[in-house]
Amino acid sequence: MSEMILRDAMSKALREALDQDDRVFLMGEDIGAYGGAYAVTKGFLEEYGEERIRDTPISESVFVGAGAGAAMIGMRPIVEVMTINFTLVAIDQIVNHAAKLSYMSNGQFKVPLILRTVTGGGGQLAATHSQSFENWYASVPGLKVVVPATPYDALGLFRASRKDNNPIIFAEHAMLYRVRGEVPEEYYEIPLGKARIAQEGSDVTLIAYSGMVKVAEEAAEIFYRNDISAEVIDLRTLSPLDLETLVNSVKKTSRAVVIEETWKTGGFSGSIASDIQEAAFDFLDGPVLRINGPDVPAPYAKNLEQLMIPKASWIVDQVKYNFGL
Amino acid sequence: MTTTLNIDKELALDLYSKMLLIRRFEEETERLYRRGKIGGFLHTYIGEEAIAVGAIPVLREDDYVIGHYRDHGHALARGLDPKLAMAELCGKSTGLSGGKGGSMHLFDAEKHFMGGHAIVGGQLPLAVGIALGIKLKKLDSVVMCFFGDGAVNEGEFHEAMNLASLWKLPIVFMLENNLYGMGTQVNRSRAGGPDIYKAAEPYLIPAVQIDGMNLIEVRDTVIEGVEKVRKDQTPIFIESMAYRFHGHSVADPSNYRDNEEVEENRGRDPIDIFKENLLSANFATNEEITAIDELIENQIDDIREFAESSPEPEEIELYSHIYASPEEELNNE
């Protein structure tokens, strides 16, 4: 067992893909000569050469679409869009094309495209650079959405992703790249659509993903000190969604809180809360709570930005207020 | 007066049949649409047949074709089964995509027909990717990508031209300039004027403008162009001047075009032009031409009957192929 940061886990995952599968190539903005905006692909250009490590112009639409096109003829492109904010420039290729080609061709074409991108706020990058759109993509049939929270999961989920034959949004949280965790030497994979019970508990279920798992764990720690047993579930993937694990947990705890970094209105937490209520209403002691960032564009000023990223104390306060715990 | 045609006689007659098949196929789609048998949007290729038939049969089987939503002509020129195409238009289980794609989204993986694509310009990045895949696999196939004058004002057009040239990708950019992006005349939508092929020059892509009503001109240009793309592994750009004889879609009465313009262009019917070529080269007599016409008419009857009598998709198909399973083989492996 060795320890590594999430950035290194991703580098390892990409190297493996390049080493083991000659259909794999990488393309994206500044992944080569610059080494990647978040340094995940540092040294790759020297190691693998220009053919397979392709620096693109700042033309998200064409290089994301080109990933889909190459996938249509059996390549396995891994495309990096520097941040999820920029994927909006390519959303036509993602939503109208990559996601639809299998269905519209009745399965004649598959699009094994991994779109790696960086999500989340907290870096004082203001309104255009701090957003979390993975929840939007999770609502599109035909796409899968992977949102790792640990180095172990980042590697394991990526291994499964590159064996999948569908377009995948692989969203890495900017604030998690330096998170350290154990990663075994032995090979393992984590299947897409299987949530992780990060911590077992019996009084309340805290459901989170990506950057919010850490926040849920902090809340669980506070609960523990107050003799409340919280179960923390890390979704790992938004699509497919492991509703079964959520429902089983809620049947045990009777209380659920869904935590999501971004806006409440239209948030994915709403969809999850609704799914749980439909599936386990009789087991619930109260409404499924939603902890989201407020509906505001991300501000620049540090103190203001911190006001829009959910905190453990928000979870604790809401659980106390609603469930009397 | 006898003129010479620089094309094999048998092939010439086959190409004539293909053009006529597209024309009669499209006329039948309009009738089926009016009878409520075809739904959604229906964009016919009537008037533009010389481009698809002049260009696509030049390609090899291992080349690729991708295009826009006015795709029936491209599909038939590529040799897709017209019965399956018509069944697709009628939303039947026997259709090319089991009735799930419809008129604007015809696909045939076996024929390397990579789709009609219905978001204007959206097929251009895909074409770049297919060409990139060809390059990385070290094959000598080419991609022929069709798009209309409406697509050239999309950002994706410029992004695709830039990357295709920068990375030296084997693409034949086939612009079908029918002068109208839906109802908006090209002069009212493009600052650069009507000679769109000039838009390729800043990207260092060799470009020509040709008469898209003249099959022989299209074919000769494409033969030379495809050879160059295959040899040099670089893109080229061919602008075919065209005119659609009917509205943008069947629902369009075409009020934005004046009758004089429409009539003048109908006077340059690509099928009549090629028919005259055949007759004056003594490739066919009037009787032989009539025989081809009758053959196609009968074929259309079979096509319609097949489509109409085919069953609708099973309801369970609503949920099939949203995702590919990991066990399935990838394309062209």
Image: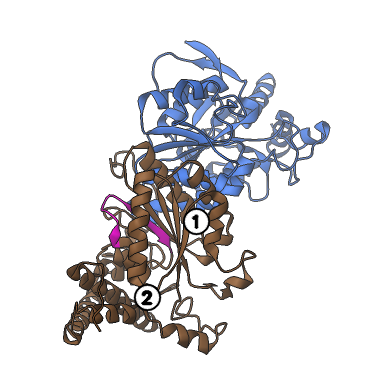
Chain colours: A blue, B brown
In the displayed structure image, the side of residue A88 where residue B230 appears, left or right: left
Q: What residue range appears in magenta?
A: B57-68
Whether residue B17 is visible to the viewer of this picture, yes or no, is yes
Foreground tag (1 vs 2): 1
**Viewport quadrant of the C terminus of chain A:** top right
In the displayed structure image, the side of residue B9 where residue B137 appears, left or right: right
* Residue B101 lies in quadrant: bottom left
Chain under disc 2: B
Residue placed at 26% from the left, 77% from the top? B3
Chain under disc 1: B
How far separated are the C-alphas under marks 1 and 2?
Answer: 24 Å
Nearer-N-terminus badge (1/2): 2
Label 2: which residue? B38
Q: Within the magenta stretch, is there residue B257?
A: no
Task: Pick whichever, B114 or B135, lies toward us.
Answer: B135
Task: Pick whichever, B320 or B82, lies toward us.
Answer: B82
Label 1: which residue? B122
Task: Pick whichever, A138 or B126, lies toward us.
Answer: B126
Please name the amino acid that badge 1 sits on: Gly
Within 10 Å of the Cα at label 2, are there few (<14), some (14-19), or many (20+) other Cα atoms?
many
Q: Position of residue B69 (x, y in %)?
A: 43, 65
Q: Within the magenta stretch, is there residue B65?
A: yes
Q: Position of residue A209 (x, y in %)?
A: 58, 33
Q: Is residue A118 above or below residue B19?
A: above
Q: Is residue B220 above or below residue A126?
A: below
